[in-house]
Amino acid sequence: MQSEAGSAQLNNSLIKRVAGLVTKVSDAFAFPLRTSHYIELVNPLWSTHALQARVEAVWDETSDSRTITLRPGLNWRSHRPGQHLRIGVPIGGQHFTRTYSISSAPERNDGCFTITVKAIDNGRMSHHLVRKLKVGDYVPIGVPQGDFYLPDAQPVLPLFITAGSGITPIMSMLRSLVLQERMPNTVHIHYAPHTYDVIFGRELKEIADRQKLYTLNLVHTREPGQKPEDITGKRPHFSKEQLEQLCPDWRKRDVYACGPQAMLDAIEKLYESEGLSRQVHTERFRAQLAGVPTEVKTGVVKFLNSNVSANSDGETNLLRLAEDSGLNPEHGCRMGICHGCDVKLASGCVRDLRTNALINETGQVIQICVCAAVGDAEIEV
């Protein structure tokens, strides 16, 4: 006798096959568009040619950070705690895309997920998401990606080290562990300027109160009311001495760290010096860039497909240069990971900002989010 689950799976499979056949026929009449484009006019979440999400709720975590609850459309698949996804937003007639960590647990049962965004200085998209996005808006999204997550099979003693909005992927892990009732022996060190700057501060303390195996250490890097320009002396940032004090058994633990580049660099350097690099797992919000060369050559970049030229300072990446010139090239992570911004170099030379390696072969594919022009260059954008 067939089980109810097996019967439901068979029915779903049959429905998808029938829907696929109907769509294939209707697409012929919808040409040059697809049936999905017309369905999108009725409900964007029903479209199949592009994945979208509707803003269901917004919640201010701190004065400059906001949690956004999103209901995804068809073709969505659940995430692993710690993963990220791409979010797109039209701003001023241009389409911008950024990558944000998912802050909710995959176990939530309302079909939604959340991202938590901190408005950063000169951040066009982060300011839009924190200040202007409202309930009922639709945003294009990608599927969850990334390998920053806890292993399923092997037991692990986690040491979470986070700062600022770096708490977001770790929050997804913590929420998932709580809902699954399998919190391991965990130590968490989180850095923030003041108490009121701690994203998820109340929930973190509640978890610490209820989960006996979870130890929370909140480190405030400024005195109450102190501004960055008022700080004198050494700040209480990450150090080996501090780590020894807050987590004496740190050498036995796997560290999962997310936050500013300087903190992640310090963690990786410490663990490398101890021969423990394999225990370090980091998630970076930005590409790890090499130092700027002593001599930087300026020039003019011509975006051939758009017939637009822009002056380059030799340091600004080509994607930002194109956007500042009013163009809207395709892109994704802006970190040199997803290759969503790959284009061909038509002439000239560019520098990979991560390694300072020069690329000057005509027709070679470059990633414009992590490359800057060296003198004059022509790009197929």
Image (cartoon, rainbow, N blue to C red):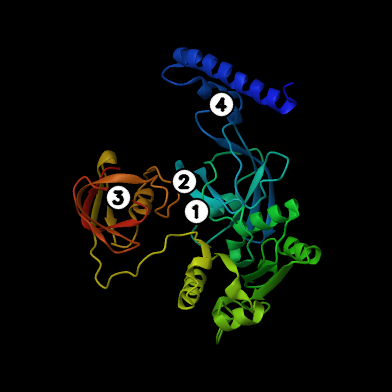
356 relative to 287 in the view: left or right: left
Position of residue 322 relative to residue 190, above or below, is above
Q: Of the residues under marks 3 and 4, which one precedes in the sequence?
A: 4
Q: Residues within 10 Å of mark 2 (few under 14, many from 20)?
A: some
State which mark lies toward you, 2 or 3: 3
Position of residue 274 relative to residue 108, above or below, is below
Q: Give the residue number, with chain letter if any, for mark 2.
A: 96
Q: CA distance from mark 4 to mark 2?
A: 21 Å
Q: Using the image, tell me which numbered label, if any, was put on residue 366.
A: 3
SS of the residue under disc 1: helix
Picture quarter with the C terminus: top left
Disc 2 and disc 3 in contact, CB within 8 angstroms: no
Q: Residue at x 52, y 63 (%)?
A: 281
SS of the residue under disc 3: strand
State which mark lies toward you, 1 or 3: 3
Q: Give the residue number, with chain letter if any, for mark 4.
A: 40
Q: CA distance from mark 3 to mark 4?
A: 34 Å
SS of the residue under disc 2: strand
Q: CA distance from mark 4 to mark 1?
A: 27 Å
Position of residue 330 relative to residue 243, above or below, is above
The spot of residue 53 in percent (x, y) is: 60, 38
Disc 1 and disc 2 in contact, CB within 8 angstroms: yes
Q: Of the residues under marks 4 and 1, which one precedes in the sequence?
A: 4
Q: Of the residues under marks 2 and 3, which one precedes in the sequence?
A: 2
